[in-house]
Image (tube, rainbow, N blue to C red):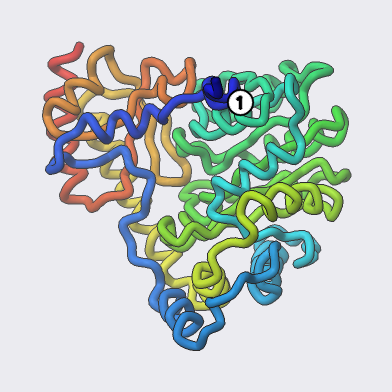
Amino acid sequence: MTTFSERVERISISGIREVFEAAGDDAINLGLGQPDFPTPEHARRAAVDAIESGKADAYTENKGTPSLREAIAEKHRADQGIDLDPSNVVATAGGSEALHIALEAHVDAGDEVLIPDPGFVSYDALTKLTGGEPVPVPLRDDLTIDPAAIEAAITDDTAAFVVNSPGNPTGAVSSEADVREFARIADEHDVLCLSDEVYEYTVFDGEHHSPIEYAETDNVVVVNSASKLFSMTGWRLGWVYGSADRVERMLRVHQYAQACASAPAQYAAEAALRGDRGVVDEMTASFRRRRDLLLDGFDEIGLDCPTPQGAFYAMPRVPEGFVDECLDRGVVVVPGEAFGEHGAGHARISYATDEAQLREALDVMGEAYEAAR
């Protein structure tokens, strides 16, 4: 009798999804990692034009349209100062597929992948789907990734380590010094550094840096996406890049799993990359205001929270029962343990919602805090 693969039995439905389903229809949702801004009009128009002209009717190249890959390469040349060949870019079905094909191409059964704990839920699950073994690495007290902790966790079985800045679920931004260390570790230990940079443009304090800027070998692969950069989560358009050899292996997985990213989404993403970036500045300024509003509210409540320097998440330390008390009062927050063992005692709060709802939610969180402590 055919049952189920051992790999799929090792994973379960995301704890984030379970929280959503437990909440009422009229709940204030602070669990969803989705900007509340519309996709830029010029990106929408490019997709419509591609559909109406028939350009979106057929498969594109497996890697994506040449013009999109050139736009992605131009973006990274400008932002990271790297000489990125468009042929070394693969357009994917969101950043999620980019992570998936990167891990599939580099991880064998039994290999170890070092992941931040707490960290984005997909790192653990996608590693297990490859047959690999996720190895959680605790964060610093300020929720940044510690290069020394990563280096100490490397063994002969380590195939890769994942870094994420700005971070989900923490909002932490790695310093330039730490990012240089990530590159050095990849070079000296000859292990892959998989850098998840999908929140690259949402930085409030400091600057975004990528390990690929500093690596002396080809041991860095970068994942990025239009989803959070341009408020295009539903379009499902991401990309991954690295050396030609690494891209060729990732392409082998992509071509069988996906063939190519959605053609209309590719045209939309190209327009977003080449067009007016005003929406990016507007979103960042708005998220900074919301972060400050949230932190002020936490101070009034008595919740301790490391200051998020980017993305649109905060991860305060909360008393036991706080998440349930919030849910019972109609505010969705996600328990920290959904993101790893070391997330226990925290809650992830997304402030990608309007300020009026944030103020209302803070009133509820104050009540929940008093009830739980």
Residue at 86% over, 32% down: 190
Residue at 38% over, 65% down: 282
Identify the element where label 1 is drawn: helix
Quadrant housing residue 105: top right
Closest to the observer: 310 or 273? 273
Quadrant housing residue 91: bottom right
- Up-down: is 50 above or below 39? below
Q: Specify the quadrant that holds the N terminus.
A: top right
Quadrant housing residue 283: bottom left
Left or right placement of residue 52 versus residue 324 in this view? right
Residue at 50% over, 21% down: 141
Closest to the observer: 7 or 320? 7
Is residue 181 among the parts visible in the rendering? no
x and y percent of residue 144 in the render?
55, 30
Is residue 308 among the parts visible in the rendering? yes
Which residue position holds label 1? 128
Residue at 62% over, 39% down: 175
x and y percent of residue 328 in the render?
13, 25
The amino acid at mark 1 is Lys
Closest to the observer: 209 or 321? 321
- Up-down: is 262 above or below 99? below
x and y percent of residue 319 in the render?
27, 14
x and y percent of residue 6 in the render?
59, 20
> Seen from this angle, which residue lies furthest front?
1
Q: Specify the quadrant that holds the C terminus.
A: top left
